[in-house]
Each structure stands twice: as C-alpha cells, then as structure tokens.
Image: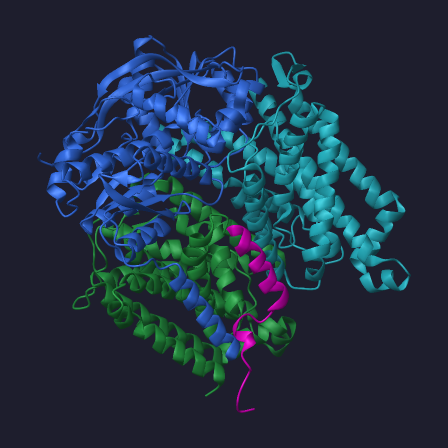
Chain colours: A green, B blue, C cyan
Amino acid sequence: MSRRAAVLAIGLVLLALVPPVAAAIGQPFYVDVFRRVMIFAIAAISLDLILGYGGMVSFGHAAYLGIGAYAVGIPAFYGIHNGWLQWTIAIVVSAAVALLIGAVSLRTSGVYFIMITLAFAQMLYYLGNSVEEYGGDDGMRLAARSALGVVDLRNGTTFYYVVLALLVLSLAVGHRLINSRFGMVVRGVRSNEPRMRAIGFSTFRYKLVAFMVAGAMCGLAGALLVNHTEYVTPEFMHWTRSGDIMFMVILGGMGTLGGPVLGAVVLRLLEDLILPAWTQHWQAILGPFLVLIVLFAKRGLVGLLPERRDG
Amino acid sequence: MRTVTRIAFLLLAMLLAVTPAAAQEKVKIGFITTLSGPQGVIGEHMKNSVELALDHLGRKIGGLPVEVIYGDDQVKPDVGKQVADEMLKRHKVHFVSGVIWSNVMLAVAPTVTAAGTFMIGTNAGPHDLAGKLCHELFFTTSWQNDQTPEAMGKYMQDQGITDVYAMAPNYAAGKDMVSGFKRYFKGKIVDEVYTKLGQTDYQAEISQLRAKNPKAVFVFYPGGMGIQFLKQYAEAGLRGQIPLYSVYTVDEISLPAVKEAASGQFETRYWSPDLKNAANEKYVNDFKKKYGKMPVFYGAQSYDGMFLIDSAVKAVKGNLADQKGMIAAMRKADYPSTRGKYTYNINHFPIQNFYLLKAVAGPGGEPVMQIQKTVFENHKDSYSKECGMKW
Amino acid sequence: MLLVLEQALNGVQFGVTLFLMAAGLTLVFGIMNLVNLAHGALYMLGAYLAATFYQRTGSFFTALALALVVTLVIGILVELVALRTLYERDHLDQVLATFGLILFFNEMVAIVWGRAAIYAKLPAWLSGHIQVLPGIRYPLYRALVIVVGLLVAVLLWLLVNRTRLGMLIRAGASNRTMVSALGVNIRLLYTLVFGLGAALAGLAGLMAGPIYAVQIGMGEEILIQVFVVIVIGGIGSIKGALVGALVVGMVDTLGRAFLRPTLATVLSPSAADSAGPALASVLIYILMAAVLFFRPQGLFPAASR
C-alpha cells in the first residue's frame, strides 16, 4: 500500500469516527458539516475523473449538481419520495445531459472547451431560474428526504453513513475505472491524444464515456446535496460553484483519488466555517490563497506527500 | 506526511478557536444575513441596526445579558441552512433572526422552527411562510413580499392611471411583484416585460417601451439592476416624459449611487426615515450619528426584531423555556416599533400601513425619500387565509 | 420599421461596449496565451477610479486620464507579481489563479469604497440626444461609446499591423524563442501588452460607469458575455473580437426586443410570454454552442494556434 493510499484510508476512518466523536463532545453540528464536506468530495472526485485523469477542463460541472438536485426535488414535488427511483433518475438524467453536452463540447479543446462547458451550465442555470413551477430562482423546499426503505435518511447519523458509503463507493469506482483498459486510454489521451488516435483508438468516444460517468457521479452528489439541504435552487448551478468544485480538485491534487477528498475537506471548512468567523473580508484571504496554491503547490496538498514508500 | 499532519492540526486548531465557550444564563440570538460579496451592503445595514438596538436596550434583552452571533449566508440557501444548523446545534441559540432573501428564508425558517426554536424574520416574506407553511414559532417584523406592490397597484388604481407598462427581472420574485401589483390595479396594462436576471443594459427594452407609448411605467428592479435601469431611463430622456413607479428599486442604499436620475421616483413602502414617531426619530438620528449614513428599511426591520425579542423575554421574566408565554407576548407587538404601532395577523405577519414615497431633493440637495400619503391603512397580506394557525 | 433600426443601433452600441472589453482579453490571450478571468476586475477598477477621480477633480477628462493611467499601473503590477509566472502554465491554472484574483479585487474594493454601489456622474454636456434619423433620437453618450469603440478598433489594428511594437507582438505570438533570440526583451514586451490590455479593460469600465451601476462584481456580470464574444470570434483575434462583439450585441439586443412578439405569432401568447424571456436570456450561449459545433476554433481562428 502506498503512503497516499494509507493516508486516504486513515482519512476515511477519521470521517467514520465523526458522528460518535461529535456526540461525545455534544456538538452534533459537526455531523452536518462533514456530511456536506463528503457530498462535495464526491462531486470533486467526479470532476477529477475527467479533469485530472482525462485532461478535460470542464468549467460547468456544477450543472450536474443542479440536475441531480432537481431530479430529487421534482418527483418529491409531485409526492414521489421513493429514493431508489429519485436517485436513479438523478444518475440517468445527469448522464444523458452529460452525453449531450459532451457530444458538442468534446469537439473543441483548450479554452474553447472550458468556455463551452461554462456556457452549457449557464443555460441550465437560466433555465432553472425561469421555470416557475419549481420555484424559479427561489427554488423549492424538499418536502421530505428520499425514502430508502429501512434506511431512514431523516436520522442525521444514518444519512451521514450513507454518504460515507457512497463516497467510498465513488472512490472504488474511480479506482477501478482508472486502472482499467478504459482508464488507460483516457489517461493516454491526456498525455498525447494524436498518438492514441494513431494507435487506432476512437479517442472521442472514450472521452465522451468518461464525461458521462463524471456527470452521473456528480448527479448523485446533487441528489445527496438536496437531501442534505432539503432545498433546491438554480444557485447550485451557478458558475462560481463550478469554480469551487474545480478548486477543490486542484487544492487537494488532481489526478489522484485522495486529492479531491482532501481538497473538499479543506476548502469547505475554510469557506463555510473558519474564514467567515474571522472576518467578513475573508474573500480577500481566500483569493490570494488560491493564487499561491496554483503558483507554488502545483500538485496540490497531496503533492506534499512523498510518492511511495516502496519504490 | 508531516506537512499533512500539520495541516490537519492547524485546521483542527482553527475549528476549535471558533467554537464558543459553554453558555450560562443569557439570551443567545443567531442573526443570519449576507455579510460578504456585493450584497453584503444590506447585511452591513442590518448588523449595524442590530447593534444600535442593543445599545438602546442597554446591551440586555429582557433584562438578561445577550450574545448575538452573526452568520453569513453568502446569498446561498444551502449555506444559510448550514449557518442555521450551526447556530442551533453548536451555539444552541434561543432565537434565529435576520435573513434577507426569500430562498434562503425558505431553507432556514422550517429548519429553525422544526428544531423548536424561534425564527424572527427581519426581511424576506415569501408567501409560503405567510400561508401554508406558517408556524407559531415564526414571526416577522417586515412584510409579506406582495404587500408593497399591492400598495402601488392600489395607489395607481386610485389615481385612475391607465396604460401601464410593467417590467421586472425574469424570476420568481419579479413575477410575484407584477401579480401583486395586478391584484389591486385593474386598469389597462400595455405590456408586461421580463428581463434577464442581473441584466446590465436596458436600452433595447427602453426603446420597446417608448415605442408602445405608455402613460406610466411600473418596475421592480432591486439592487444593482435598479441603479442601471434608472440611470438609463433618465439617459434616454424618459424621466420627464413618462412617470416611473417602482417597488424595492429605490432606497437609501441605492439613492447615493443614482442621485438625480431618481428624482421624482415613486415607491411604496411601510417605512421611511421621515416617518414621524418617537422610536423612528431616535433610530434614524442615532443611526446617522453612529454610522454616518442614512438608515434603510432593512435596518429598521432588524432594529425592530431585537425590540420584539426583548418584549417577549421581558413578558416571561427571562424564563426562556416558556415559549407559549413568549408567543403570546409577541402576538401583541407591544414594543416601540420604528413604523409606529402595528398588530399581528393570524400568520404572524404585520398588519400595517403602506405609504407612497417620492424621491425629492433633501436639505443638502441630495435626494431623499419622502412620504407623500398613506395608501393602505392596516393592510393585511393576501395569504393569511391559507394559514391554519389558531390563536 | 424605425423601431427595428433603433434596436439595430442599440445592438451595435452594446456590441461595441462588449468589444472594448473583448479586445484587451483577446489581445492578452493571443499574445501570451493567458486566460485572464481577472479582466473583469480591471474593468471594475476603471469604473471605480473614474467615478472617484471625477468627483474629486471635477474634470471629466482629468478623471479619464488618471483612471486610465492608474488601471494601467495596477495591471502592470498584477502582471509582475502574479501573472507573469502563469504564461507557461496550462489554462486550468490560469483560470484558477485569476479566479482567486477576482475574489481579492472584489474584497479590496469593498474595503476601500465600501460594499454599496457608488455614484458615477454623466457630464451634463454629454447627457443630451442627437437626431439620428427623423423619428430616432439617440442618447449622445451612447453615440459617443460607439465612436470610441470603433476608434479603439482602428487604433488597435494600426498598432498591431503598422508599428514596430505590433510587429514584435505578432512575432512574439508566433515564435517566442526566436524573438528573444533576436535580442528583444520579451518579458518587457509581455508586461507592456498586459498593461495595454488592462488599460482597455479600464477604458471599458470608465465608459460603462455613467450608464451602468458601479458596484462590486460588475466585472463578472459582463465578463461571461465577453468570453462568449471572443470564443465566437476566435480567441486571440482582434478582428474576431470585433465581429463576435457585434454579432453577440446584435443577437442579444434583437432577441430581447423581438423574440417574444415573434414567438407570439406562432405560439399561444402565454407560451410566448414564458418561453420568450427565457430563450432570450440564453440566446448568446446557444449561438456560441452552434458556432463551435460547426467551427470548433471560432469564426476567425488566430493563425498561430
């Protein structure tokens, strides 16, 4: 086991210990905090699959967060609370939208790709704002959390462990994918696309599938986020959210699985809790922090760890 | 490895540093507003007004020491909800107050009341909370969103104005404002135009407007959108030609940025700095003295919020466990409100007067809002019928 | 018919406003291959500085000159301190670092000027109207914006195609190593180009001040539209920026003015009422997606990339 994997494992164990520790110190609030952190970690992992491993700089990833959220919110609005159904819709619709966006966007590259993914997210954002039935920009309240049979999400701790399990599952899926033949091709595309094409791979299709998988996974994160917040708004799709998720990946270290998780933990805690408690001008601290990370910690926080103990 | 451990410790230390010490017998109020980003200007007014209220109350609420914890919602419902959770579960507050935005309020209020804690809104008044989601632990010192455009509709109806051109941003609040307006305005509406949310340039819409040749224009453009619309309306030379009536578009925050482009502008509101009563005069004068600028209605409501809580805690003689007693006390609205005496409707929304305001040149030449006449006396919101609460 | 003409004029004017922003952005991208999200922050600074200097000095032209110079200096400082090292990095790093700069500048403006929007005055002698055609009165200031924008387009074209500096810029864009081998100080050249880009953003901002709200975040509102412009035009191409800006300005303006009435002739009025504004909001994004679908490099791909 590499050191990084060991650190990741320790981190996951620590996350598993959050509810009992929070209960012990009488601060159940931290269960909410870390549940939210883990949901964003899933979103960040999904972005990392295409960004870190596939070299596809999608600046509209928050769109799937919104799609996943509305996929739960809209059925709930009509009284359908079956979580299996809602979450399936979230994943399928996100994948379908990713397929459409990817089919157009992946024809471009570089800055064009960044901007066209941003444009699609903007379209969805404005769409959400103008759909009056579902609250428009006001958004709508989720009448009840998704019903998953015996698993009761209304219990904060149960919900916490569901999210943790899905985080582990996302990591496992990511790990399998990256090390599969498919993952090799996607990574190959990142380092040298013409060569991969020359060998005979249809790189477009591989990229498109990766794009879809990432969209679907982020859609699941959206479904979790709406259950956590019990509220859905188009604001989930705002471009600054896309920037936020992207920053988590870079901060933690892109092209690694543990990186996005670490990035989500650090950024969420800084943005939501620590900096605002210090000063209302916290963005003046966060901004330069971002610049410094990009300039001096190219491989993110994970990059500060030594590569491997054994070779 | 060591670096990561250090980072972990650092984060932990910072988390603990922001964890408050254990509480004893004091009133804890969590005040949620927007403090960062461009919209932080509203939050600043609200926070300053809360502090002024505490000054006036001798830093005591109902005779008990008080601690106010401010939270920044960043204009995001999910962040607002997290801040509320933090106040409920970590700080264990007795009251949550504030909240500017309807969407943040719809995420926050049910969370707070479900936890058995008071929610004292001091701005957003979405119709759900006035109607089917009303709750005995929810009170507001502001208004139901539709009341203000209703007042404008009533005024324009009474004046016999017709051929009105209505404009608003294309989002839920924009549509609500126009429908609230139409509830009382029965004259002819030439056209209803919805523009992009956050749009900066209105020249195209203004050309369309002029082509339709309306007799009056009704708009709802809050914040920066209002500033740009008013400037461009004046620039197009329409200011002297077609009278402009608006809601939530011109206030004491935007006036210094618009100045003469707003002169002659009509607004309706339940409050104005020139409203004559002792509480308001004290609030306005001391606010100007302490912060060097004019207060705005967001602040007046927040100031009122602290006095409402004070009246409740006083009535139960500091027994914060007696929620029934505090509900009964707050229903009386027995405190010196900056709007003067008002009563509560069945859904805990104020029944209050609405006035017609006009932007006129103030003493120093700077434009100020001035009350022209009373449009509504003791106006009730339109959703209280849907609220099943029994008193 | 007159209304269509008037709206077309509005479209040109909006397009020219976008061009002022797009020119600096695309110049910096074309030469240094830098995606600068903080371009909007410089636009905001231009507007704040012009408004403040105008209020302090009482002279419109002094304020313009001072605001331009200060924006230029700030731009150069930002280049020296933060952005210089980003030229060799990939676009992702540039997007993130300049996103960080946006947060920083917004907050700095909040600290210096406060969070409320500030007052930006339109000089009295610019607030009149001109008679363009019988039946069309057009605000003088907006006409001035059109003139300034077109003037900037011509000057930029002359600068890039007819001067020694322009020759170096073009050479530097296509072969950096060769130019520095010839003894040209490429770093200085880049700093100058970035300063020029910053000054253009500042110019756009100070022109916008009197008709838009001078407030925090004003840069981001327009920035995304500007990116649409340069992506449609072909990133790095000044000509593309001009064409893209005019196309976007026209499509957006005409969409806002006529989409709903047009839809109402085919759909039911209520359907048109809800679809019209929603569609008009995203029209430029649809346009961009369509352009990129057929021409993945934009309308005028810059030759060097």
Q: Quadrant of the N terminus of chain C?
A: top right
Q: Quadrant of the C terminus of chain C?
A: bottom right
Residue A111 versus residue B180 in the image, above or below? below
Horizontal and vertical percent position of residue A161: 27, 70
Relative depth, front residue between A309 and A126: A309
Start-end of magenta stretch: A283-311
Residue A206 versus residue B168 in the image, above or below? below
Horizontal and vertical percent position of residue C117: 53, 33
x 26%, y 16%: residue: B376
C157 lies left or right of B282? right
Horizontal and vertical percent position of residue B349: 22, 31
Total tally of numbered discs in the picture: 0
In reply to whether residue A309 is colored magenta, the answer given is yes
x 14%, y 40%: residue: B316
B231 lies left or right of B182? right
Residue B2 versus residue A77 in the image, above or below? below
Residue A91 seen in the current view: no
x 15%, y 36%: residue: B315
C21 lies left or right of B39? right
Relative depth, front residue between A194 and B350: B350
In reply to whether residue B272 is colored magenta, the answer given is no
The quarter of the displayed image where residue A270 is located? bottom left
Residue C110 seen in the current view: yes
Horizontal and vertical percent position of residue C2: 58, 18
C253 lies left or right of C185? left
The quarter of the displayed image where residue B34 is located? top left
Outermost residue on the top side: it is B160
Relative depth, front residue between B166 and B42: B42
